[in-house]
Image (cartoon, rainbow, N blue to C red):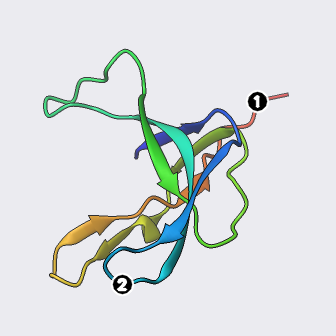
Amino acid sequence: MIQVTIAQTTVKEFKGTSKTTQKPYHLRMQAAYAHTVDKEGNKPPYPEKFEIMLDGDAQAYAPGEYTLHPSSLYIDRDGRLAVSARLAPLKRPSAAA
């Protein structure tokens, strides 16, 4: 399981026209932090920052803890395993009363 932290709801937007296709584009990105491990299974002391591309006009993820949703993994047009981050809230064990 890969844990992802969202710290804030700020979204960066990029709009323009493609130089090659002359079609307009509109990209929306949100910062996230992945709690990764290295090849030996060691966790770095801090999570690593990356950006999630938001689908269309989807709302920004709320601050909190998430994991990668299974739909994040897919086979691309070249037959390779690819990742497009989609998040699912991380369910924490409830505190015993």
For label 2, the SS is loop
Q: Is residue 2 left or right of residue 20?
A: right
Q: State whether residue 46 is above or below residue 55.
A: above
Residue occupying the point 59% across, 56% down: 88
Picture coordinates of residue 94, whole percent (x, y): 74, 36
Picture coordinates of residue 44, whole percent (x, y): 31, 20
For label 1, the SS is loop
Q: State whether residue 81 is above or below residue 79.
A: above
Tell me if mark 1 has few (under 14), some (14-19) or many (20+) residues whose alpha carbon lies within 10 angstroms of its own: few
- Three-letter residue code for mark 2: Thr
- Read off the residue under disc 1: 95
- Mark nearer the viewer, 1 or 2: 2
Q: Is residue 80 left or right of residue 21?
A: left
Quadrant for the C terminus in the image: top right
Q: Quadrant of residue 87?
A: bottom right
Residue occupying the point 69% across, 54% down: 60
- Read off the residue under disc 2: 21
